[in-house]
């Protein structure tokens, strides 16, 4: 959308007499062709990746070259190459089978290299003297208006229909996406030879720089104030997808956390989730046979994706002090009755706790999300694809 608006504005300036009648057909063509090409070629590329057998390093080249082909075809047909490649990437990512984490890591490295190269080129193009020349009261007013009014207002208008919590909207409005993209878009008027294009470029550069320094440096504080901090990271160190078999399985390595469930009982007494097999235990860089796990051990298992959340709980740290870990299958009626809290008027007492939390979070539950309901604070401790698997409970002081 940003690319289209920039190009459309340039065309309106360059072509006398042009207006909405000129821009609207171009927008429709960019949107429809981009969606069609991205969907069709994305599904095709996903099938190729799923069926073909190559060396691990060649999958990276296949996906990268396929993405460039999607972008090129969409652009040649008059569609949005950016929309097409974005859609194709999502389709391929959700269809992948034997494309391992290593391929994703290499692709991530390519992305960082591209960003570094882009910033280097922008630094070469930027004239420091012209950048200082655009620093004035009017430009600073524009910076403040974008940071404090335009971005929060846009985030609110776009996210309210999807019932995002107000604290999440406030967080997105303050530290939303920013970086080199606005500066790259400011290059378009330069390439088109518009009047005052150098001044526009340096103003965009200055706005982005101030936004990065001010809003970027306060990201941690904003996350704490909005209550959107994620809990401690996963205890899973690495994983690799195995080919063949349904459902798909992974070899996953976990590091046993201090005071975890797995370290409090004998290894033979652990109640493993379904379709999970222990492969080895590594202690002090040696594969060992042990009767009981201890903190720091590396445990390798073969498991399905559905079993990973239970393994995270098994090997992960205990719940925070003052928080109770609830049975996911418990009903909210029993929970609220036990703690003497009134049941929400719109809730069915027979609803499972995890379903209740997921519904209240509009199907977008993520680890760390909180719900305050009639004196009970419910915290999502484990979730995936909108499904809540583990919930923690804290009581308000008057209910302890």
Image (cartoon, grey):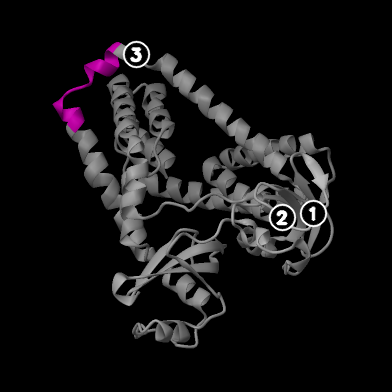
Q: Which residue is mark 3?
A: 127
Q: Earlier in the sequence, mark 2 or mark 3?
A: 3
Q: Nearer the viewer, residue 90 or 334?
A: 334
Left or right for 340, reference 149: right
- Say which quarter of the image contains residue 123: top left
* Residue nearer the viewer, 32 or 177: 177
**Can residue 20 be seen from the camera position used here?**
no
Stretch of the chain drawn in magenta: 129-140
Mark 3: secondary structure: loop
Disc 2 secondary structure class:
loop
x, y percent for residue 306: 68, 65
Mark 1 or mark 3: whose residue is earlier in sequence: 3
Taking the image as shown, residue 7 lies to the left or right of residue 260, namely left
Q: Which residue is mark 1?
A: 290
| Distance Cα–Cα, label 2 vs label 1 | 7 Å
Residue 86 in the image: above or below residue 12: below
Q: Which residue lies under the disc numbered 2?
A: 293
- Is residue 137 magenta-colored? yes
Q: Residues within 10 Å of mark 3 (few under 14, many from 20)?
A: few
Residue 175 sits above or below residue 309 on the image: above
């Amino acid at each position: 959308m940003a690319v289209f608006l920039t190009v459309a504005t340039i065309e309106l300036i360059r072509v006398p007499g042009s207006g909405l009648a000129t821009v609207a057909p171009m927008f429709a063509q960019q949107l429809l062709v981009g969606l069609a090409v991205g969907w069709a070629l994305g599904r095709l590329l996903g099938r190729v990746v799923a069926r073909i057998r190559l060396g691990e390093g060649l999958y990276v080249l296949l996906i990268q070259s396929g993405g460039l082909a999607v972008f090129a075809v969409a652009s040649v047909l008059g569609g949005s190459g950016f929309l097409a490649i974005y859609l194709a990437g999502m389709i391929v990512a959700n269809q992948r089978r034997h494309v391992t984490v290593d391929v994703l890591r290499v692709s991530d490295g390519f992305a960082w290299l591209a960003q570094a190269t882009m910033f280097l080129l922008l630094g070469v193009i930027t004239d420091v003297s012209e950048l200082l020349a655009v620093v004035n009261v009017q430009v600073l007013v524009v910076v403040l208006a974008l940071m404090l009014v335009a971005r929060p207002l846009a985030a609110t208008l776009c996210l309210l229909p999807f019932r995002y919590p107000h604290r999440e909207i406030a967080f997105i409005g303050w530290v939303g996406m920013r970086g080199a993209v606005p500066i790259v878009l400011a290059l378009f008027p330069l390439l088109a030879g518009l009047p005052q294009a150098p001044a526009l470029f340096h103003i965009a550069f200055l706005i982005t720089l101030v936004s990065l320094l001010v809003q970027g440096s306060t990201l941690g504080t904003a996350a704490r104030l909005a209550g959107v901090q994620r809990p401690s990271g996963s205890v899973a160190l690495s994983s690799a997808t195995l080919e063949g078999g349904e459902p798909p399985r992974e070899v996953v390595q976990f590091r046993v956390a201090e005071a975890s469930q797995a370290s409090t009982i004998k290894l033979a007494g652990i109640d493993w989730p379904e379709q999970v097999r222990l492969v080895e235990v590594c202690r002090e860089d040696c594969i060992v046979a042990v009767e009981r796990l201890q903190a720091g051990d590396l445990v390798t298992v073969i498991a399905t994706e559905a079993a990973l959340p239970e393994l995270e709980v098994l090997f992960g740290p205990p719940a925070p002090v003052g928080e109770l870990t609830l049975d996911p299958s418990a009903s909210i009626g029993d929970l609220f009755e036990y703690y003497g809290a009134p049941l929400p008027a719109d809730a069915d007492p027979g609803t499972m706790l995890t379903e209740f939390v997921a519904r209240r979070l509009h199907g977008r539950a993520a680890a760390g999300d909180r719900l305050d309901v009639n004196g009970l604070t419910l915290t999502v401790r484990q979730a995936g694809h909108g499904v809540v698997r583990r919930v923690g409970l804290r009581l308000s002081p008057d209910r302890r």
